[in-house]
Image (cartoon, rainbow, N blue to C red):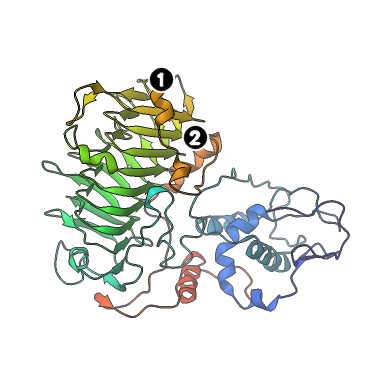
Amino acid sequence: METPSSTWNAGVPWNGVVWNRNRHWSMPTEHTILGHRLKMARLVLAFRRACGAHGTGEPPSTPQPARWPASLISKLGRAVHLCLSPRDLLCCCCWISRRLPLSSPLLLHHMEIPRPPETQMPYGDADCTLRALAARAEGFGCHAIGGLHGALYYVTSLQDDGCGTLREACRIKEPLWIVFEVSGTIDLQSYLRVSSYKTIDGRGHRVKLTGKGLQLRDCHHVIVCNLEFEGGRGHDVDGIQIKPNSSNIWIDRCTLADYDDGLIDITRQSTDITVSRCHFSRHDKTMLIGADPTHVGDRCIRVTIHHCFFDCTRQRHPRLRFGKVHLYNNYTRNWGIYAVCASVEAQIVSQSNIYQAGEKKTVFKYMPEKAGDKEEVAAGWIRSEGDAFLQGAQSCLIDGPGVDTVFRPEHYYDKWTMETASPALKEVTPRRCDSGAAVQLVPQNFSAGLSEREEPAADCELRYFAMVFESDQICTP
Protein backbone atom coordinates (compact mmCIF):
# COMPACT_ATOMS: atom_id res chain seq x y z
CA MET A 1 0.00 0.00 0.00
CA GLU A 2 1.39 3.37 -0.96
CA THR A 3 1.68 6.22 1.51
CA PRO A 4 0.80 9.89 0.96
CA SER A 5 3.67 12.01 -0.26
CA SER A 6 5.01 14.84 1.87
CA THR A 7 3.88 17.38 -0.74
CA TRP A 8 0.21 16.92 0.04
CA ASN A 9 -1.90 19.56 1.67
CA ALA A 10 -4.20 18.72 4.53
CA GLY A 11 -7.71 17.91 3.41
CA VAL A 12 -6.74 16.78 -0.08
CA PRO A 13 -8.28 13.36 -0.77
CA TRP A 14 -6.10 10.36 -1.67
CA ASN A 15 -7.92 7.23 -2.93
CA GLY A 16 -11.08 8.54 -1.28
CA VAL A 17 -9.34 9.21 2.06
CA VAL A 18 -9.01 12.66 3.62
CA TRP A 19 -6.25 13.63 6.01
CA ASN A 20 -7.62 15.85 8.79
CA ARG A 21 -5.55 18.21 10.86
CA ASN A 22 -6.74 16.24 13.89
CA ARG A 23 -4.29 13.55 12.76
CA HIS A 24 -7.04 11.10 11.79
CA TRP A 25 -7.91 9.42 8.55
CA SER A 26 -11.53 10.00 7.62
CA MET A 27 -13.68 8.35 4.97
CA PRO A 28 -16.68 9.90 3.21
CA THR A 29 -18.51 6.56 3.62
CA GLU A 30 -17.97 6.29 7.35
CA HIS A 31 -21.31 4.57 7.99
CA THR A 32 -20.15 1.52 6.04
CA ILE A 33 -17.34 1.06 8.55
CA LEU A 34 -19.16 1.73 11.78
CA GLY A 35 -21.89 -0.75 10.94
CA HIS A 36 -19.60 -3.71 10.37
CA ARG A 37 -17.82 -5.08 13.45
CA LEU A 38 -16.02 -7.61 11.29
CA LYS A 39 -13.43 -4.97 10.41
CA MET A 40 -12.01 -5.27 13.91
CA ALA A 41 -11.14 -8.92 13.33
CA ARG A 42 -8.89 -7.88 10.48
CA LEU A 43 -7.01 -4.98 12.02
CA VAL A 44 -3.75 -6.86 12.20
CA LEU A 45 -2.81 -5.71 8.73
CA ALA A 46 -4.09 -2.23 9.44
CA PHE A 47 -1.86 -1.79 12.47
CA ARG A 48 1.12 -3.06 10.50
CA ARG A 49 0.61 -0.77 7.57
CA ALA A 50 -1.15 2.23 9.01
CA CYS A 51 0.70 5.53 8.64
CA GLY A 52 0.94 7.59 11.81
CA ALA A 53 1.91 11.24 12.10
CA HIS A 54 3.08 11.55 15.69
CA GLY A 55 2.91 15.07 16.93
CA THR A 56 2.27 16.83 13.61
CA GLY A 57 -0.80 17.88 11.71
CA GLU A 58 0.54 16.89 8.31
CA PRO A 59 0.55 13.50 6.65
CA PRO A 60 3.77 11.52 7.11
CA SER A 61 6.16 11.18 4.20
CA THR A 62 7.13 7.67 5.33
CA PRO A 63 5.37 5.12 7.52
CA GLN A 64 5.98 5.54 11.22
CA PRO A 65 6.40 2.74 13.78
CA ALA A 66 3.05 1.46 15.00
CA ARG A 67 2.40 1.86 18.72
CA TRP A 68 -0.38 -0.26 20.16
CA PRO A 69 -1.31 -1.86 23.47
CA ALA A 70 0.36 -5.22 23.93
CA SER A 71 -2.99 -6.85 24.79
CA LEU A 72 -4.50 -5.58 21.56
CA ILE A 73 -1.52 -6.80 19.55
CA SER A 74 -1.90 -10.26 21.09
CA LYS A 75 -5.53 -10.44 20.01
CA LEU A 76 -4.83 -9.03 16.57
CA GLY A 77 -2.00 -11.48 16.04
CA ARG A 78 -4.46 -14.36 16.20
CA ALA A 79 -6.12 -13.02 13.04
CA VAL A 80 -2.89 -12.65 11.05
CA HIS A 81 -4.01 -15.00 8.30
CA LEU A 82 -6.80 -12.66 7.16
CA CYS A 83 -6.15 -10.06 4.47
CA LEU A 84 -7.92 -6.97 3.22
CA SER A 85 -7.79 -4.88 0.10
CA PRO A 86 -5.90 -1.56 0.35
CA ARG A 87 -9.23 0.28 0.57
CA ASP A 88 -10.40 -1.88 3.47
CA LEU A 89 -7.08 -1.38 5.21
CA LEU A 90 -7.64 2.35 5.10
CA CYS A 91 -11.16 1.85 6.38
CA CYS A 92 -9.74 0.00 9.37
CA CYS A 93 -7.18 2.75 9.94
CA CYS A 94 -9.96 5.27 9.95
CA TRP A 95 -12.06 3.20 12.35
CA ILE A 96 -9.35 2.59 14.91
CA SER A 97 -7.81 6.04 14.77
CA ARG A 98 -11.07 7.64 15.89
CA ARG A 99 -11.42 5.22 18.79
CA LEU A 100 -7.80 5.12 19.86
CA PRO A 101 -6.55 8.67 19.14
CA LEU A 102 -2.89 9.43 19.52
CA SER A 103 -3.60 11.06 22.87
CA SER A 104 -5.21 7.91 24.26
CA PRO A 105 -3.63 6.59 27.47
CA LEU A 106 -3.87 3.10 25.96
CA LEU A 107 -1.11 3.88 23.50
CA LEU A 108 2.34 2.95 24.71
CA HIS A 109 4.30 6.01 23.62
CA HIS A 110 7.53 4.61 24.98
CA MET A 111 7.16 1.12 23.59
CA GLU A 112 8.23 0.40 20.00
CA ILE A 113 6.48 -2.66 18.61
CA PRO A 114 8.75 -4.22 15.97
CA ARG A 115 7.00 -4.68 12.67
CA PRO A 116 7.23 -8.18 11.27
CA PRO A 117 9.09 -8.49 7.99
CA GLU A 118 6.84 -7.97 5.01
CA THR A 119 6.53 -11.06 2.84
CA GLN A 120 4.43 -11.80 -0.18
CA MET A 121 2.61 -14.85 1.09
CA PRO A 122 0.04 -16.47 -1.20
CA TYR A 123 -3.67 -16.96 -0.56
CA GLY A 124 -4.02 -13.85 1.57
CA ASP A 125 -7.80 -13.77 1.18
CA ALA A 126 -8.47 -17.49 0.74
CA ASP A 127 -9.97 -17.65 4.25
CA CYS A 128 -12.37 -14.73 3.80
CA THR A 129 -15.30 -17.03 3.05
CA LEU A 130 -15.86 -20.72 3.44
CA ARG A 131 -15.53 -21.70 -0.21
CA ALA A 132 -12.93 -19.13 -1.28
CA LEU A 133 -10.36 -21.93 -1.61
CA ALA A 134 -12.00 -23.33 -4.74
CA ALA A 135 -9.85 -22.89 -7.86
CA ARG A 136 -7.43 -20.69 -5.90
CA ALA A 137 -4.34 -22.93 -5.87
CA GLU A 138 -1.22 -21.60 -7.52
CA GLY A 139 0.65 -23.77 -9.96
CA PHE A 140 -0.38 -26.94 -11.71
CA GLY A 141 -3.30 -27.58 -9.33
CA CYS A 142 -4.89 -24.21 -10.08
CA HIS A 143 -8.10 -25.70 -11.50
CA ALA A 144 -8.97 -27.82 -8.45
CA ILE A 145 -12.44 -26.81 -7.27
CA GLY A 146 -13.05 -29.56 -4.72
CA GLY A 147 -16.65 -29.64 -3.54
CA LEU A 148 -17.46 -26.09 -4.64
CA HIS A 149 -20.80 -27.05 -6.17
CA GLY A 150 -21.82 -29.53 -3.49
CA ALA A 151 -23.63 -29.35 -0.18
CA LEU A 152 -21.93 -28.99 3.18
CA TYR A 153 -21.24 -32.14 5.15
CA TYR A 154 -20.61 -31.71 8.88
CA VAL A 155 -18.26 -34.23 10.50
CA THR A 156 -19.43 -34.69 14.08
CA SER A 157 -17.80 -38.03 14.95
CA LEU A 158 -14.16 -39.01 15.31
CA GLN A 159 -14.94 -42.69 14.79
CA ASP A 160 -13.37 -44.51 11.85
CA ASP A 161 -16.72 -45.12 10.16
CA GLY A 162 -20.41 -44.53 10.65
CA CYS A 163 -22.87 -41.67 10.72
CA GLY A 164 -21.27 -38.24 10.78
CA THR A 165 -17.73 -39.56 10.11
CA LEU A 166 -15.15 -38.40 7.61
CA ARG A 167 -15.12 -41.80 5.93
CA GLU A 168 -18.87 -41.66 5.32
CA ALA A 169 -18.47 -38.25 3.68
CA CYS A 170 -15.56 -39.30 1.46
CA ARG A 171 -17.39 -42.31 0.01
CA ILE A 172 -20.40 -40.27 -1.12
CA LYS A 173 -20.25 -39.86 -4.89
CA GLU A 174 -21.78 -36.38 -5.10
CA PRO A 175 -19.67 -33.21 -4.64
CA LEU A 176 -19.31 -32.23 -0.98
CA TRP A 177 -17.62 -29.49 1.04
CA ILE A 178 -16.66 -31.36 4.21
CA VAL A 179 -16.18 -29.35 7.42
CA PHE A 180 -15.66 -30.35 11.05
CA GLU A 181 -17.59 -29.60 14.21
CA VAL A 182 -15.15 -31.56 16.37
CA SER A 183 -11.42 -31.58 17.02
CA GLY A 184 -9.37 -34.63 17.88
CA THR A 185 -7.77 -37.77 16.45
CA ILE A 186 -9.28 -40.16 13.92
CA ASP A 187 -7.62 -43.58 14.12
CA LEU A 188 -8.00 -45.07 10.65
CA GLN A 189 -8.06 -48.86 10.45
CA SER A 190 -7.67 -48.80 6.65
CA TYR A 191 -6.92 -46.26 3.95
CA LEU A 192 -9.55 -43.55 3.74
CA ARG A 193 -10.46 -43.42 0.07
CA VAL A 194 -11.60 -40.02 -1.23
CA SER A 195 -13.96 -39.74 -4.18
CA SER A 196 -13.99 -36.93 -6.73
CA TYR A 197 -15.17 -33.38 -6.11
CA LYS A 198 -14.49 -33.24 -2.39
CA THR A 199 -13.06 -30.54 -0.15
CA ILE A 200 -11.85 -31.79 3.24
CA ASP A 201 -11.68 -28.50 5.12
CA GLY A 202 -10.13 -28.71 8.58
CA ARG A 203 -9.94 -24.96 9.18
CA GLY A 204 -11.01 -23.91 12.66
CA HIS A 205 -10.29 -27.31 14.25
CA ARG A 206 -7.32 -29.55 14.90
CA VAL A 207 -8.04 -32.87 13.24
CA LYS A 208 -5.34 -35.55 13.19
CA LEU A 209 -5.39 -38.75 11.12
CA THR A 210 -3.36 -41.69 12.43
CA GLY A 211 -2.96 -45.38 11.60
CA LYS A 212 -3.42 -44.99 7.85
CA GLY A 213 -3.78 -42.09 5.45
CA LEU A 214 -5.84 -40.64 2.61
CA GLN A 215 -5.98 -42.48 -0.69
CA LEU A 216 -6.90 -40.56 -3.84
CA ARG A 217 -7.48 -43.21 -6.52
CA ASP A 218 -8.88 -42.31 -9.93
CA CYS A 219 -10.34 -39.13 -8.51
CA HIS A 220 -10.42 -35.54 -9.66
CA HIS A 221 -10.90 -32.10 -8.13
CA VAL A 222 -10.00 -32.73 -4.50
CA ILE A 223 -8.86 -30.11 -1.97
CA VAL A 224 -7.40 -31.16 1.39
CA CYS A 225 -6.54 -28.40 3.84
CA ASN A 226 -5.63 -27.97 7.50
CA LEU A 227 -5.27 -31.61 8.52
CA GLU A 228 -2.56 -33.38 10.50
CA PHE A 229 -1.17 -36.77 9.50
CA GLU A 230 0.96 -38.69 12.01
CA GLY A 231 1.85 -42.26 12.89
CA GLY A 232 0.82 -44.24 9.81
CA ARG A 233 1.73 -47.93 10.09
CA GLY A 234 1.87 -50.79 7.61
CA HIS A 235 3.34 -51.77 4.25
CA ASP A 236 2.98 -49.07 1.57
CA VAL A 237 1.16 -46.74 3.98
CA ASP A 238 1.55 -43.09 3.00
CA GLY A 239 0.08 -40.01 4.60
CA ILE A 240 -1.50 -38.98 1.30
CA GLN A 241 -1.33 -41.45 -1.59
CA ILE A 242 -2.30 -40.06 -4.99
CA LYS A 243 -2.53 -42.82 -7.62
CA PRO A 244 -3.51 -43.77 -10.28
CA ASN A 245 -4.88 -41.31 -12.87
CA SER A 246 -5.92 -38.64 -10.38
CA SER A 247 -5.86 -34.97 -11.37
CA ASN A 248 -6.60 -31.44 -10.18
CA ILE A 249 -5.56 -31.96 -6.57
CA TRP A 250 -4.59 -29.31 -4.01
CA ILE A 251 -2.98 -30.21 -0.66
CA ASP A 252 -2.72 -27.06 1.45
CA ARG A 253 -1.56 -26.20 4.98
CA CYS A 254 -1.26 -29.78 6.22
CA THR A 255 1.18 -31.21 8.78
CA LEU A 256 2.68 -34.63 8.02
CA ALA A 257 5.09 -36.76 10.07
CA ASP A 258 6.17 -40.32 10.91
CA TYR A 259 4.69 -42.73 8.35
CA ASP A 260 6.11 -46.14 7.48
CA ASP A 261 6.38 -45.31 3.77
CA GLY A 262 6.04 -41.81 2.35
CA LEU A 263 4.31 -38.67 3.53
CA ILE A 264 2.99 -37.79 0.08
CA ASP A 265 3.32 -40.11 -2.94
CA ILE A 266 2.22 -38.97 -6.41
CA THR A 267 2.48 -41.77 -8.98
CA ARG A 268 0.83 -43.72 -11.81
CA GLN A 269 -0.08 -40.86 -14.16
CA SER A 270 -1.55 -38.56 -11.54
CA THR A 271 -1.06 -34.95 -12.57
CA ASP A 272 -1.95 -31.26 -12.15
CA ILE A 273 -1.28 -31.16 -8.41
CA THR A 274 -0.24 -28.38 -6.01
CA VAL A 275 1.24 -28.94 -2.55
CA SER A 276 1.46 -25.69 -0.59
CA ARG A 277 2.17 -24.40 2.94
CA CYS A 278 2.70 -27.90 4.33
CA HIS A 279 5.00 -28.89 7.21
CA PHE A 280 6.96 -32.12 6.86
CA SER A 281 8.96 -33.51 9.81
CA ARG A 282 10.26 -36.68 11.53
CA HIS A 283 10.42 -38.78 8.40
CA ASP A 284 12.78 -40.50 5.96
CA LYS A 285 11.33 -40.73 2.43
CA THR A 286 9.26 -37.58 2.37
CA MET A 287 7.79 -37.18 -1.10
CA LEU A 288 8.03 -39.47 -4.12
CA ILE A 289 6.79 -38.29 -7.50
CA GLY A 290 6.88 -40.95 -10.20
CA ALA A 291 6.55 -44.62 -9.33
CA ASP A 292 9.57 -46.40 -10.85
CA PRO A 293 11.54 -46.43 -14.13
CA THR A 294 9.15 -48.89 -15.79
CA HIS A 295 6.12 -46.59 -15.46
CA VAL A 296 6.84 -44.45 -18.49
CA GLY A 297 3.26 -43.13 -18.39
CA ASP A 298 4.38 -40.91 -15.53
CA ARG A 299 5.82 -38.53 -18.13
CA CYS A 300 2.49 -36.68 -17.84
CA ILE A 301 3.02 -35.81 -14.15
CA ARG A 302 3.04 -32.09 -13.30
CA VAL A 303 3.37 -30.89 -9.69
CA THR A 304 3.91 -27.52 -8.00
CA ILE A 305 5.37 -27.41 -4.47
CA HIS A 306 5.60 -24.00 -2.83
CA HIS A 307 5.91 -22.32 0.57
CA CYS A 308 6.44 -25.68 2.29
CA PHE A 309 8.65 -26.37 5.30
CA PHE A 310 10.77 -29.53 5.13
CA ASP A 311 11.97 -29.71 8.72
CA CYS A 312 14.84 -32.15 9.31
CA THR A 313 13.36 -34.80 7.02
CA ARG A 314 15.96 -37.16 5.57
CA GLN A 315 15.44 -37.17 1.78
CA ARG A 316 13.03 -36.75 -1.15
CA HIS A 317 12.00 -33.11 -1.05
CA PRO A 318 11.00 -34.41 -3.54
CA ARG A 319 12.48 -37.27 -5.61
CA LEU A 320 11.14 -37.09 -9.15
CA ARG A 321 10.94 -39.51 -12.07
CA PHE A 322 9.75 -38.53 -15.56
CA GLY A 323 7.52 -35.58 -14.67
CA LYS A 324 7.76 -31.83 -14.25
CA VAL A 325 8.06 -30.22 -10.80
CA HIS A 326 8.13 -26.52 -9.97
CA LEU A 327 9.58 -25.67 -6.53
CA TYR A 328 9.46 -22.12 -5.19
CA ASN A 329 9.78 -20.38 -1.83
CA ASN A 330 10.18 -23.61 0.13
CA TYR A 331 12.39 -23.84 3.22
CA THR A 332 14.35 -27.09 3.54
CA ARG A 333 16.74 -27.55 6.45
CA ASN A 334 18.98 -30.19 7.99
CA TRP A 335 18.26 -33.06 5.59
CA GLY A 336 19.88 -36.46 6.11
CA ILE A 337 21.06 -37.48 2.60
CA TYR A 338 20.07 -34.87 0.00
CA ALA A 339 17.36 -32.27 -0.49
CA VAL A 340 16.06 -32.76 -4.04
CA CYS A 341 16.65 -35.69 -6.40
CA ALA A 342 16.30 -35.86 -10.19
CA SER A 343 15.93 -39.42 -11.45
CA VAL A 344 15.14 -40.64 -14.96
CA GLU A 345 13.86 -37.89 -17.30
CA ALA A 346 13.00 -35.56 -14.42
CA GLN A 347 12.55 -31.85 -15.08
CA ILE A 348 12.86 -29.72 -11.92
CA VAL A 349 12.69 -25.94 -11.69
CA SER A 350 13.89 -24.67 -8.29
CA GLN A 351 13.22 -20.95 -7.77
CA SER A 352 13.98 -18.84 -4.71
CA ASN A 353 14.04 -21.72 -2.24
CA ILE A 354 16.08 -21.79 0.98
CA TYR A 355 18.34 -24.80 1.51
CA GLN A 356 19.96 -24.75 4.95
CA ALA A 357 22.38 -27.62 5.43
CA GLY A 358 23.07 -29.57 8.60
CA GLU A 359 25.61 -32.37 8.65
CA LYS A 360 24.91 -33.33 5.02
CA LYS A 361 25.62 -30.66 2.41
CA THR A 362 24.37 -32.03 -0.94
CA VAL A 363 21.30 -30.16 -2.12
CA PHE A 364 20.63 -31.51 -5.62
CA LYS A 365 21.28 -35.17 -6.34
CA TYR A 366 21.16 -36.84 -9.75
CA MET A 367 20.23 -40.52 -9.81
CA PRO A 368 20.58 -42.15 -13.29
CA GLU A 369 18.06 -44.84 -14.23
CA LYS A 370 16.94 -46.60 -17.41
CA ALA A 371 13.44 -45.84 -18.62
CA GLY A 372 11.36 -48.89 -19.43
CA ASP A 373 11.18 -48.01 -23.14
CA LYS A 374 14.79 -46.90 -23.63
CA GLU A 375 18.23 -48.44 -23.55
CA GLU A 376 20.39 -45.65 -22.12
CA VAL A 377 20.77 -44.90 -18.43
CA ALA A 378 20.34 -41.23 -17.57
CA ALA A 379 19.22 -38.85 -14.85
CA GLY A 380 17.03 -35.80 -15.23
CA TRP A 381 17.87 -32.12 -15.14
CA ILE A 382 17.52 -29.33 -12.59
CA ARG A 383 17.47 -25.59 -13.21
CA SER A 384 18.11 -23.45 -10.13
CA GLU A 385 17.21 -19.75 -10.11
CA GLY A 386 17.65 -17.49 -7.09
CA ASP A 387 17.99 -20.29 -4.53
CA ALA A 388 19.77 -19.58 -1.22
CA PHE A 389 22.30 -22.15 0.02
CA LEU A 390 23.04 -21.67 3.73
CA GLN A 391 25.45 -23.15 6.25
CA GLY A 392 27.72 -24.73 3.68
CA ALA A 393 24.99 -26.23 1.51
CA GLN A 394 26.42 -27.29 -1.84
CA SER A 395 24.14 -27.16 -4.85
CA CYS A 396 26.08 -29.89 -6.77
CA LEU A 397 24.29 -28.74 -9.93
CA ILE A 398 25.31 -30.34 -13.21
CA ASP A 399 25.48 -28.06 -16.22
CA GLY A 400 24.79 -29.32 -19.68
CA PRO A 401 22.53 -29.06 -22.73
CA GLY A 402 19.68 -30.71 -20.84
CA VAL A 403 19.27 -27.69 -18.54
CA ASP A 404 17.90 -25.65 -21.45
CA THR A 405 15.27 -28.30 -22.12
CA VAL A 406 13.75 -28.05 -18.64
CA PHE A 407 10.22 -26.67 -18.86
CA ARG A 408 9.30 -23.05 -18.19
CA PRO A 409 6.50 -22.63 -15.59
CA GLU A 410 5.20 -19.53 -17.35
CA HIS A 411 4.27 -21.73 -20.29
CA TYR A 412 1.76 -23.56 -18.07
CA TYR A 413 0.33 -20.90 -15.72
CA ASP A 414 0.28 -17.13 -15.81
CA LYS A 415 1.39 -16.10 -12.33
CA TRP A 416 2.52 -17.28 -8.93
CA THR A 417 3.40 -15.54 -5.66
CA MET A 418 7.18 -15.65 -5.30
CA GLU A 419 9.73 -13.50 -3.54
CA THR A 420 13.45 -13.62 -3.08
CA ALA A 421 14.93 -16.24 -0.76
CA SER A 422 15.44 -13.93 2.20
CA PRO A 423 15.74 -14.08 6.00
CA ALA A 424 12.14 -12.81 6.15
CA LEU A 425 10.94 -15.75 4.07
CA LYS A 426 12.90 -18.15 6.27
CA GLU A 427 11.27 -16.70 9.37
CA VAL A 428 7.67 -16.62 8.20
CA THR A 429 7.44 -19.94 6.32
CA PRO A 430 7.36 -22.23 9.40
CA ARG A 431 4.64 -20.09 10.98
CA ARG A 432 2.44 -20.18 7.89
CA CYS A 433 2.72 -23.97 7.52
CA ASP A 434 0.36 -24.55 10.44
CA SER A 435 -2.55 -26.91 9.99
CA GLY A 436 -4.12 -25.52 13.18
CA ALA A 437 -4.46 -21.95 11.99
CA ALA A 438 -7.23 -20.20 13.90
CA VAL A 439 -9.82 -19.98 11.14
CA GLN A 440 -13.45 -20.32 12.15
CA LEU A 441 -15.76 -20.13 9.17
CA VAL A 442 -17.79 -23.28 9.82
CA PRO A 443 -21.36 -22.87 11.13
CA GLN A 444 -21.87 -24.33 14.58
CA ASN A 445 -24.53 -26.54 16.19
CA PHE A 446 -25.75 -28.33 13.11
CA SER A 447 -26.69 -31.96 13.03
CA ALA A 448 -24.30 -34.54 11.65
CA GLY A 449 -24.20 -35.50 8.03
CA LEU A 450 -25.36 -33.93 4.81
CA SER A 451 -27.09 -30.60 4.90
CA GLU A 452 -28.18 -27.96 2.43
CA ARG A 453 -28.05 -25.28 5.13
CA GLU A 454 -25.21 -22.83 5.02
CA GLU A 455 -24.86 -19.51 6.74
CA PRO A 456 -24.01 -16.42 4.70
CA ALA A 457 -20.29 -15.69 4.59
CA ALA A 458 -20.72 -12.54 6.67
CA ASP A 459 -22.38 -14.47 9.51
CA CYS A 460 -19.60 -17.05 9.48
CA GLU A 461 -17.01 -14.30 9.62
CA LEU A 462 -18.78 -12.51 12.46
CA ARG A 463 -18.54 -15.75 14.44
CA TYR A 464 -14.82 -15.65 13.77
CA PHE A 465 -14.80 -12.06 15.06
CA ALA A 466 -16.44 -13.19 18.30
CA MET A 467 -13.87 -15.95 18.71
CA VAL A 468 -10.87 -13.66 18.26
CA PHE A 469 -12.15 -10.89 20.51
CA GLU A 470 -13.65 -12.76 23.44
CA SER A 471 -14.00 -9.61 25.50
CA ASP A 472 -15.27 -6.24 24.36
CA GLN A 473 -12.27 -4.27 25.55
CA ILE A 474 -12.13 -2.34 22.30
CA CYS A 475 -14.68 0.37 21.64
CA THR A 476 -17.31 -0.89 19.21
CA PRO A 477 -19.73 1.06 17.04
Q: Nearer the viewer, residue 386 or 40?
A: 386
Q: Residue at x 35, y 20 (%)?
A: 360
Q: Considering the image in quadrants, where does the C terminus appear?
A: bottom right
Q: Would residue 468 be found to the left or right of residue 236 on screen?
A: right
Q: Is residue 335 left or right of residue 232?
A: right
How many residues crowd mark 2 within 10 Å: few (<14), some (14–19), many (20+)?
A: many
Can residue 303 be seen at all in this image of the molecule? yes
**Quadrant holding the N terminus:** bottom right
Q: Could you tell me which secondary element the residue under label 2 belongs to?
A: loop
Name the one closer to the observer, 473 or 201.
201
The local secondary structure at tag 1 comes to: loop
Amino acid type at circle 2 is Ser
Question: Residue 140 vs residue 18: left or right?
Answer: left
Q: Quadrant of residue 41?
A: bottom right
Real-space Cα separation, disc 1 to disc 2, in angstroms = 21 Å
Residue furthest to the bottom in view is 453
Q: Amino acid at mark 1?
A: Gly
Counting from the top left corner in percent of width and height, residue 175 is at 27, 69
Residue 213 is left or right of residue 477, and the answer is: left
Q: Position of residue 189 (x, y in %)?
A: 11, 54
Instruction: State the residue at coordinates (20%, 67%).
Output: 165
Q: Which residue is mark 2?
A: 352
Res. 400 mark: 1
Image vertical order of residue 75 relative to residue 398, above or below: below
